[in-house]
Amino acid sequence: MLADEFGREVTGVRVSLTDRCNFDCVYCHNEGLGDTRGPMDPQDDEMSTDDVVRFLEVAAEFDVDAVKFTGGEPMLRQDLEEIIERTPEQMEVSLTTNGTFLPGRAEALVDAGLERVNVSQDALDPEDFAAVTKSGAYEKVLEGVDAALEAGLDPVKLNMVVFEHTAGYVPEMVDHVARNEGMQLQLIEYMPELTGKPEWNVDIGRVHDWLAEQADEIEHREMHDRKRYWVSSDDGDGQGMVEIVDPVENPTFCANCHRVRVTHQGHLKGCLNRNDDLKPMGEMSKPEIREAYREVVANRVPYYGEYMIKNGDDEWELNDKYIEEYAGI
Ligand SMILES: Nc1nc2c(ncn2[C@@H]2O[C@H](COP(=O)(O)OP(=O)(O)OP(=O)(O)O)[C@@H](O)[C@H]2O)c(=O)[nH]1
Ligand SMILES: C[S@@+](CC[C@H](N)C(=O)[O-])C[C@H]1O[C@@H](n2cnc3c(N)ncnc32)[C@H](O)[C@@H]1O
Ligand code: SF4
Ligand code: SF4
């Protein structure tokens, strides 16, 4: 297994299969690449099925044991089932999706080897959902969650970005997953780094405090040192798990980051928040992939605490070291 100079072993890869999407969420960072708007048809710059599989085979050589497929909307790729089918056995396969294409396809994905799914659901009301996603597909998303549960995916994690538009829904969403077996909730701190609009920020510390009061049990996940709260439903009949993803200005989160990303164009990326460390994998032959992978892992640095450091006024600023290193890129 390869590790960077901060001792962070790379155990997982996150592969963006496309940057196309049928939604236009107001907050979307598109896994670090910006806008998802544009044509919906398959694009020439996307990695082919074989490219993705070859990359995964190389990652497996380096003992990577988990892959997350994401996007854009990864289910716009019609070869997703084939990619999953051809993913090396040793990898846990998970998917993050907006859920609209799960009805009718969830079973085939499971048959191909999908083990887990995260479905983005930011509200429990069609109008608020539409305001956030610029889409009227609320019912389809609910159907998608049901289809995933029926296909045996367990848990189905609901991803909710906590920001000004959604913060009021947190208690309702927590109760929703506590009542419904098989569902879990992932509350994702709104990340303004790539999308701007810091005015939408919500103090995630208050969400932690509220959950700590409600929780029957609290645990830590090794990945990113994330906290997980086990909370009972309001009627006392059920219990659900709520995980908080709080990467913003959080050096502990970055110190426990064990993932490398791949863009839909086949560029390796050491950190979600950076685009100055993109590394193309050439024609994507195995030797080229190996070399690029080794280099990207070796050059990974924690974003908060190393790439960004606190200045004398207690504000985050770019570490001079990296200004020089990447000057001109
Ligand atoms: N800054 C940062 N944000 C992350 C990272 N991993 C996840 N996130 C945020 O959390 C969002 C949801 O991630 P998902 O892909 O659904 O799942 P996950 O939480 O990473 O993985 P699992 O919980 O194992 O399914 C991402 O799109 C990011 O906004 C990370 O390494 N760094
Ligand atoms: C970029 S989407 C790609 C996968 C799929 N289209 C979806 O929405 O689930 C992956 C995750 O990133 C989250 N996300 C997007 N922009 C974000 C932001 N600015 N801050 C925090 N999370 C964000 C979304 O909520 C979603 O759960
Ligand atoms: S569904 Fe996912 S990729 Fe599409 S706009 Fe929303 S967050 Fe971005
Ligand atoms: S270093 Fe930090 S910001 Fe970058 S991907 Fe890892 S956790 Fe996210």
Image (cartoon, helix red, strand yellow):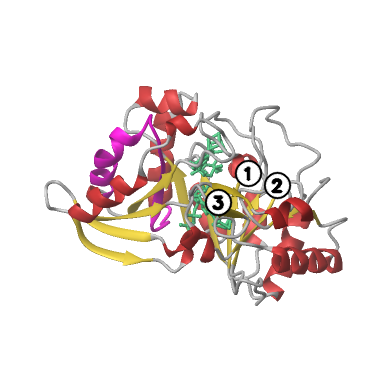
Point out residue 90 in the picture as x, y percentages from the top left corner.
60, 73
Report the residue that reaches farthest toward the front: 312
The magenta span reads 151-177
Dividing the image into 4 quarters, which one contains the N terminus? Answer: bottom right
Q: Earlier in the sequence, mark 3 or mark 2?
A: 2
The front one of 109 and 47 is 47
SS at mark 3 in the image: loop
Label 3 Cα neighbours within 10 Å, binned few <14 / some 14-19 / many ≥20:
few
SS at mark 2 in the image: loop
The disc at residue 311 is 3
Q: Is residue 100 left or right of residue 226?
A: right
Asked whether residue 72 is in view, the answer is: no
Give amino acid for label 1: Gly
Q: Is residue 328 left or right of residue 227?
A: right
Give amino acid for label 2: Asn
Give amino acid for label 3: Asn
Q: Earlier in the sequence, mark 1 or mark 3?
A: 1
Label pair 2/1, CB-CB below 8 angstroms: yes
Q: CA distance from mark 3 to mark 2?
A: 23 Å
- Please report the residue visible at 43 percent of the width from the left and 31 percent of the height from the top: 200
Disc 3 under 8 Å from ligand 4? The reply is no
The disc at residue 32 is 1
Q: CA distance from mark 1 to mark 3?
A: 25 Å
Foreground mark, 1 or 3, reads 3
Q: Is residue 285 magenta?
A: no
- Please report the residue visible at 69 percent of the width from the left and 53 percent of the height from the top: 320
